[in-house]
């Protein structure tokens, strides 16, 4: 069974060979006047919003009651990612997103769009509705930096307060936009030797190439093990996938570490292999 996740036109960069190197905050977030380590960020815009993955850390309604419906599993919290003009919701049941803008300290969110995939987990399925009900229209937005931690607070028109902790994106950490690459991931991982991890299983990958219309072009690269993780990607055994990734140069890598890093952009194609 072959599932095409997205229909692209694709903006591509030139390709090269794959290297083989191996306490919750309540709604009131304003800092106390005696706290000199915290400072609110006065200017909120796509630039600073796009520097982080925003992971939901707390949510309360106007009566101060925690909104439990927004918390489904602790390993993958609800996450907001901002591009220049697009807001994407990560770790919900369906792929969800909307246009947005920031005007006079308020986040203006357009109509939420979503895929229609059924989710076997009832709580995660309900999460889609719970977040869509709150991320629409005009929301107050405020950023607060405390030490090395940046948080974003959104207040909805109904008075719900959502607090997100910022996790720097790969582009922020590596100091550049990265290069676009396409990797095909084989259905099964393979044993590989790693200096620090015994019995290491590596993804088996090869580079793919596409034209501006999103059609395959050229000859795929050779299959080879990838001795590192792809940030944001979890491989499911038995599923072959084509990924669009960002590749970053790691400055001053450790002696036993890779000189490049990969981050998942989108899953272009997904196919179940075998039974």
Image (cartoon, helix red, strand yellow):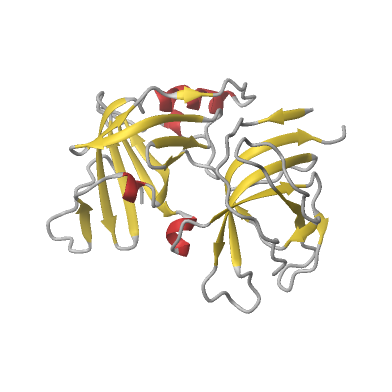
Q: Is residue 72 left or right of residue 29?
A: right
- Image position, residue 94 (x, y; %): 55, 28
Residue extending farthest to the bottom is 255
Q: Is residue 44 above or below residue 67?
A: below
Identify the residue at image location x=65%, y=44%: 243
Identify the residue at image location x=67%, y=61%: 228
Residue extending farthest to the right is 275
Q: Is residue 25 visible?
A: no
| Viewport quadrant of the N terminus | top right
Q: Is residue 82 left or right of residue 74?
A: left
Q: Is residue 20 above or below residue 212?
A: below
- Image position, residue 131 (x, y; %): 42, 28
Q: Is residue 141 above or below residue 143?
A: above
Q: Is residue 66 above or below residue 207?
A: above
Q: Nearer the viewer, residue 166 or 85?
A: 85
| Viewport quadrant of the C terminus | top right
Residue extending farthest to the left is 33
**Quarter of the rendering containing residue 164:** top left
């Amino acid at each position: 069974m072959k599932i095409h996740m997205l229909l692209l036109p694709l903006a591509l960069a030139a390709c090269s060979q794959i290297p083989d190197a191996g306490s919750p905050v309540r709604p009131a977030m304003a800092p106390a006047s005696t706290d000199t380590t915290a400072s609110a960020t006065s200017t909120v815009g796509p630039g600073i919003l796009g520097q982080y993955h925003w992971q939901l850390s707390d949510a309360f309604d106007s009566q101060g009651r925690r909104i439990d419906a927004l918390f489904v599993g602790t390993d993958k919290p609800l996450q907001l990612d901002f591009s220049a003009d697009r807001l994407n919701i990560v770790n919900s049941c369906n792929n969800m997103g909307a246009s947005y803008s920031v005007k006079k300290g308020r986040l203006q969110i357009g109509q939420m769009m979503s895929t229609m995939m059924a989710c076997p987990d009832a709580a995660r399925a309900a999460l889609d509705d719970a977040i869509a009900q709150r991320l629409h229209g005009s929301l107050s937005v405020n950023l607060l930096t405390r030490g090395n931690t940046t948080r974003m607070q959104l207040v909805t028109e109904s008075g719900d307060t959502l607090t997100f902790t910022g996790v720097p994106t790969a582009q922020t950490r590596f100091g550049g936009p990265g290069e676009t690459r396409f990797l095909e991931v084989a259905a099964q991982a393979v044993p590989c030797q790693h200096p620090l991890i015994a019995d290491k299983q590596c993804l088996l990958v090869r580079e793919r190439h596409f034209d501006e219309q999103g059609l395959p072009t050229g000859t795929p690269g050779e299959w080879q093990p990838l001795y590192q993780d792809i940030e944001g990607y979890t491989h499911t055994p038995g599923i072959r996938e084509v990924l669009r990734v960002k590749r970053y140069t790691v400055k001053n890598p450790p002696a036993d570490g890779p000189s490049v890093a990969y981050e998942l952009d989108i899953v272009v194609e997904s196919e179940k292999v075998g039974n």
